[in-house]
Amino acid sequence: MNKKESSSAKQCLQDMERRRFLGGLALSAGAGVIASLGVSGLSHATQSPVSNRVLVTTPTGNIGHQVLENILSSGFPIRVIDRDPSRIPSSIKGQIEVVQGSHSDPAVVDEAFKDTDTVFWLCPPDPQAESVMAAYVNFTRPACEAIIRHGVRRVVSISALGRGTPQARNAGHVTASLAMDDLIANTGVHFRALTMSSFMNNIARQATSISKQGVFFLPMDGDRKFPTVASRDIASVASGLLLDRTWSGRSEVPVLGPEDLSYNDMAKIMSDVLGKPVRYQQVSLDTFKAGFVQRGMSEAMAQATSDMYQAKNEGLDNAVQRTPDNTTPTTFRQWCEEELRPVILQH
Ligand SMILES: NC(=O)c1ccc[n+]([C@@H]2O[C@H](COP(=O)([O-])OP(=O)(O)OC[C@H]3O[C@@H](n4cnc5c(N)ncnc54)[C@H](OP(=O)(O)O)[C@@H]3O)[C@@H](O)[C@H]2O)c1
């Protein structure tokens, strides 16, 4: 690293340090769960990393592209895995190494994890999966084997709130995300699982309905408050961890946004920011699920989405106590002003 890169990396680390939110719950995977997942632990600590390279999955995704932008000027060598590298801006492509393919492919992760110190792991949504466990756990298994084979030292993953709650046993995507974390943790790698409730960004998927009818729909009680977070805050926490080589062990890092809000609270803020009435309408789980199936989602994934919302409605996201460390800065009002309003104006 030259002097300029080293000073830029130092500045970036200092910025990241201010936004670090370590101190989550220890992962507590049961041996039975681990055995059923099919990757056995390793003598990981005996292997030494040969590089300080950071590997980023989903570099064009919602969180992944922000992670990549955050760490680009860190001075660390960066490699990404992408199915379609033509979607990576050329200004960025010159500064990184690209391995083409899916990070579910054993050959792709084998190539990408060589000489890699730290991995940003995000399991992409798969609306056509035959089961939610296949979508998360089977997708991640080749990566776990490559982590072991190449002695990757640290993994930062995108996961979900709910561990330890009774609702997490049948919470669709969340149950599978937690099983994925257990699989990664069992490789022996140093591991941080970022755990969130629903992202603010999900609301923008209903931009047409918000714009044309002034309404958005979900199967949640409109008055249930939960910790909603902007993807930029998640990317910021992930980036800090990817560049910080001092942490070790395995734990969750809850990323809770600045406050708990209900969908009725959000409707009021949206009305204010957009300058027109917006209301929230609760729909039944059956209607919600049928909508996904109609739009081409597999029966299993539609059921998993419905199960997740049922669990959320019963308190899945309300078990972690808010602290200054797990509270992040972007308010829902700020997100509406900076991200939702421009989208709505295009409709
Ligand atoms: N939304 C929420 O409220 C919420 C809450 C908690 C946790 N999560 C978790 O957050 C993650 C989603 O994050 P996100 O919003 O950043 O995702 P995203 O924007 O949907 O990004 C997914 C990326 O993955 C790539 N991709 C899709 N299928 C792929 C495949 N088969 N192989 C390789 N790459 C593939 C896509 O890029 P290409 O098509 O260009 O390849 C896309 O850019 C999920 O794991 C979800 O469980 C979400």
Image (tube, rainbow, N blue to C red):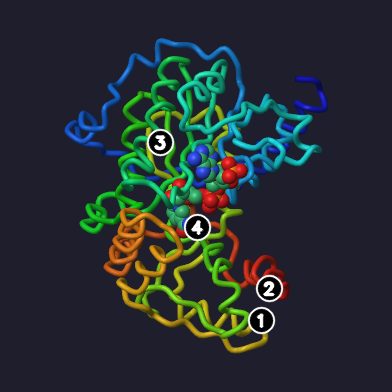
Q: Earlier in the sequence, mark 3 or mark 2?
A: 3
In this picture, is 46 found above or below 296? above
> Mark 4 touching mark 1, by CB under 8 A?
no
Q: Earlier in the sequence, mark 3 or mark 4?
A: 3
Task: Give, as a three-letter code, the residue at label 4.
Answer: Thr
CA distance for labels 1 and 2 = 6 Å
**Beta carbon at label 3 within 8 Å of ligand 1:** yes
Residue 254 makes an appearance in the image: no
Q: Mark 4 or 2, which is nearer the eye?
A: 2
In this picture, is 230 found above or below 244? below
Q: Residues within 10 Å of mark 4 (few under 14, many from 20)?
A: some
CA distance for labels 4 and 1 = 26 Å
Residue placed under numbered mark 3 in the picture: 139
Task: Give, as a three-letter code, the residue at label 2.
Answer: Arg
Percent of width and height locating residue 268? 54, 84
> Mark 4 touching mark 2, by CB under 8 A?
no
* In-front residue for pair 104/276: 104
Task: Give, as a three-letter code, the residue at label 3.
Answer: Phe
Q: Residues within 10 Å of mark 3 (few under 14, many from 20)?
A: many
Q: Which mark is residue 341?
A: 2
* In-front residue for pair 142/266: 142
Q: Mark 1 or 3, which is nearer the eye?
A: 3
- Looking at the image, which residue sits at the far left? 32
Q: Which mark is residue 327?
A: 4
Percent of width and height locating residue 34? 24, 31
Residue placed under numbered mark 1 in the picture: 274
In this picture, is 160 found above or below 337? above
> Mark 1 touching mark 3, by CB under 8 A?
no
Q: Residues within 10 Å of mark 2 (few under 14, many from 20)?
A: some
CA distance for labels 4 and 2 = 24 Å
Q: Earlier in the sequence, mark 4 or mark 2?
A: 4
